[in-house]
Amino acid sequence: MVQSLSIDDILDADLNALKALQCSAVWACVSLISESIAGLPIDIISHNNDRYTTIHNHPIKKLLNHPNDFQNGFDFIDWCLNSLLLTGNAYIYKVIGSGGEVLELLPLPPFSVSVTQNPDWSLKYQVNFNDINEVVPNNNIIHIKGKSLDGYRGLSPIACSRCAIQLNLKAQEYGLNFFLNGAAPKGVLKHPNALSKEAKQKLRESFDSGLTGSNSFKTMVLEEGLDYQQISITNADAEFMASRKFGVTEISRIFRVPAHLINSTETVSSWGSGLYELNRAFLQMSLLPWIRRLETALNDALITDDAESIRFNTEGFLRGDTKTRYESYKTALSWGWLSVNEVRALERMNPVEGGDRHLQPLNYTDLANPEPAANVTPTGETFPEGGEHSLDE
């Protein structure tokens, strides 16, 4: 029998999620992804007969906005992403009422849940948290997992990339000690005679107290044949900052976050220019895989009607500048796929009277019949002369 690969087989004992977050690049990448998705509106969409309707008062929408007594909707989704990005798994306990309705969604720490696969391919969730120490029915568990090798447990990005993260942490620790100790010895004192251990210590303390800190740059007076020789920083120390910059790039690659989005000014973006292009690329390359994992798991666990679905609304994330948006609205209005009130709704404005009509240009010509066909729409409908108006007029 082939032994499945466990996260514990990969994870280094000295590296855990909390320690990884001490690396500023890890913190920045995880925060950027989790908070970007947590800030998106969550809609419940009904799709019947090719018509899509947003259900504003759906009980699941209310549940996702207030999943429990100690988290709001933003905190809850942010926690889900933090758990996924750092451990590869997010476990949620569903509190189910007597009528089968979901009353609460409670976050379970990833380390408190052990998942195994039975011979019949079903999964078993053993929970050891607070007063719970039992196998929990699958219907009470929502399991969102990241990239997996065995199909039922997610792999931790932190564990799989421990070398790059630990290297960055060690460089960070080295840098702290480097600067705490004055970055490098400024020089050496030479004495013509041999000195005892006590004499060396007193001489060092006297010299340091007289010419370091607030006394730096004062004039030195050397006696008894002392000679001071200044030394420069080593090549290895000079390369230290370069290694730190490379470490940021490595960690950005782990989370598929462009380095410029975590304030790394050493890299140039190849993801496009302008806010819209950068946001679109970040959404497609970095956020959408995590959004799809969340949507799929939440739909399977919370939605019982096949005509309904949970969707994260990414429209706001792709909002361009005012000029770009208005030009898009003009095109949509001119060709009739948006009404004035639909545009106003996108801009969070109240509807106006008569704003629900969809307008379109009047004059179209059939390619098979070059005769002008005034007042004919692309679907072949005709209007009375002067009965409709076009935005192009």
Image: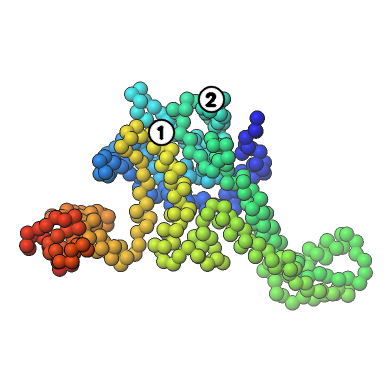
Q: How is the image coloured?
A: rainbow
**Residue 351 figure quarter:** bottom left
Q: Mark 2 or mark 1, which is nearer to you? A: 2
Image quarter of the C terminus: bottom left
Where is mark 1, residue-wise?
301
Residue nearer the viewer, 296 or 243: 296
Q: For residue 27, which numbered disc appears in the image?
A: none
Residue nearer the viewer, 90 or 172: 90
Relative to 210, is 379 above or below? above
Residue nearer the viewer, 367 or 32: 367
Left or right of 272? Residue 165 is right
Query: Looking at the picture, how far across and down is residue 124, in whole percent?
Result: 53, 27
Look at the numbered disc 1 and give the secondary structure of its residue. Answer: helix
Image quarter of the N terminus: top right
Residue type at the position of mark 1? Ala
Name the residue at 43% across, 38% down: 297
Relative to 154, is 384 above or below? below
The reply to whether residue 213 is in sight is yes
Name the residue at 53% across, 46% down: 85
